[in-house]
Each structure stands twice: as C-alpha cells, then as structure tokens.
Image (tube, rainbow, N blue to C red):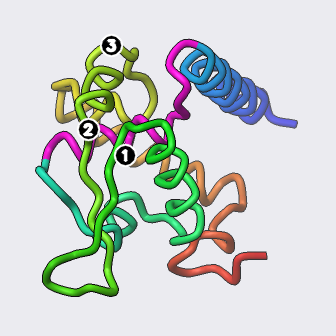
C-alpha cells in the first residue's frame, strides 16, 4: 500500500469519526441529528419551503427527508401544512423552538458551510478533494444521480 493511500485512509477515518461524534453530541444535547440541523438552517433562510424544494436542496430521498421532518414536527421544531397552491404538496416552516435550537447548537460539517464565511479558494479545494474522494474510494456507482443504488 502506498504511504499516501494510508494517509488518505486515516484522514477519511478521522473525518468519519469526528462527524459521528458531532452527531452523537448534537443528538444528546439538542435532540436533533446533523441532517435535522441542516434542515433548520435552510428553513431559517426562507419563511416556508415546499418539501419537494427542500428535498432537492439536500439531494436526498423523499422517504429519508420525510422521516426527518416528521420527527422534527413531533419535536415542535417545524410545522408542516398543505401548500395553498397545490393541496397535494406539503410546506415546511421553522418554529420558534426550531430557531432556538438553531441559534444554540454548534455548527459543524456541511451545515457549517452555510453559516460561516470561508476563503473561496479553500472551498474550491474542498470541492475538488471531495469530488476526488468519491472517485478514488470507488463510490461513484452509488451516487443517486448516476449510480444504480446498490
């Protein structure tokens, strides 16, 4: 094994472990997951958002998003109502309790990029590195837009 491959593997594992620990701490202290914090962040940027638009913004399967939003509704972090323009569609909005969680919870991982100003060159380098990671780790076949979802 190449030394560089081992170093890259260790870096990946550190990232995975740190993100998992962040998720555990977020769940324990605030009762939300990193995904749910991302949803609150997006909802705080708009007064109300159709669930379909939220799904597209997060590039996520409808069932996964639906489960996360339903749990957030039970926790009174969001409200869900019918879209007045299309009764079949649902609109999601953040509540005062959701805003309180958003204001006090630490921001880490992808949600941090929405809330912090960063050097554009570093963001470009991160984008390139993550794009390379998908390819180098052999994960491209499982990308929702191109893969078979095995």
Judge from the rendering whether residue 143 lies leftward or rightward of residue 142; answer left or right: left
Judge from the rendering whether residue 136 lies leftward or rightward of residue 118; answer left or right: right
Q: Nearer the viewer, mark 3 or mark 2?
A: 2
Q: How many residues crowd mark 3 within 10 Å: few (<14), some (14–19), many (20+)?
A: few
For the residues labelled 3 and 1, the Cα–Cα distance comes to: 15 Å
Give how far across and how far down residue 56 sits, in percent: 35, 69
* Residue with the mark numbered 1: 39
- Farthest residue, direction right: 1
Give how far across and how far down residue 113 sits, in percent: 29, 33
Q: Which mark is residue 104?
A: 3
Q: Which quarter of the figure is the N terminus placed in?
A: top right
* Residue with the mark numbered 2: 95
Asked if the residues shown at circle 2 and circle 1 are in contact, with their CB atoms under 8 angstroms apart, the answer is no
Q: Residue at x 50, y 19 (%)?
A: 30
Q: Please say if 36 is above or below 62.
A: above
Magenta includes 91? Answer: no
Q: How many residues crowd mark 2 within 10 Å: few (<14), some (14–19), many (20+)?
A: some
Asked if the residues shown at circle 3 and circle 2 are in contact, with their CB atoms under 8 angstroms apart, the answer is no
For the residues labelled 2 and 1, the Cα–Cα distance comes to: 12 Å
Q: Between residue 27 and residue 13, name the one nearer to us.
A: 27
Judge from the rendering whether residue 76 lies leftward or rightward of residue 49; answer left or right: right
N-terminal label among 2 and 1: 1
| Image quarter of residue 41 | top left
Point out the stretch of residues depicted in magenta.
29-45
């Amino acid at each position: 094994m190449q030394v560089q491959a081992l170093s890259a593997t260790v870096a990946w594992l550190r990232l995975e472990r740190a993100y998992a620990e962040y998720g555990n701490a977020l769940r324990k202290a605030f009762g939300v997951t990193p995904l749910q914090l991302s949803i609150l962040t997006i909802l705080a940027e708009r007064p109300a958002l159709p669930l379909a638009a939220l799904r597209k913004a997060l590039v996520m399967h409808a069932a996964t998003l639906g489960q996360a939003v339903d749990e957030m509704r039970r926790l009174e972090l969001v409200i869900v109502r019918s879209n007045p323009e299309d009764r079949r569609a649902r609109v999601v909005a953040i509540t005062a309790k959701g805003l309180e969680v958003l204001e006090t919870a630490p921001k880490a991982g992808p949600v941090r990029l929405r809330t912090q100003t960063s050097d554009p060159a570093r963001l470009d380098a991160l984008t390139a590195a993550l794009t390379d990671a998908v390819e180098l780790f052999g994960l491209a076949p499982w990308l929702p837009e191109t893969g078979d979802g095995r």
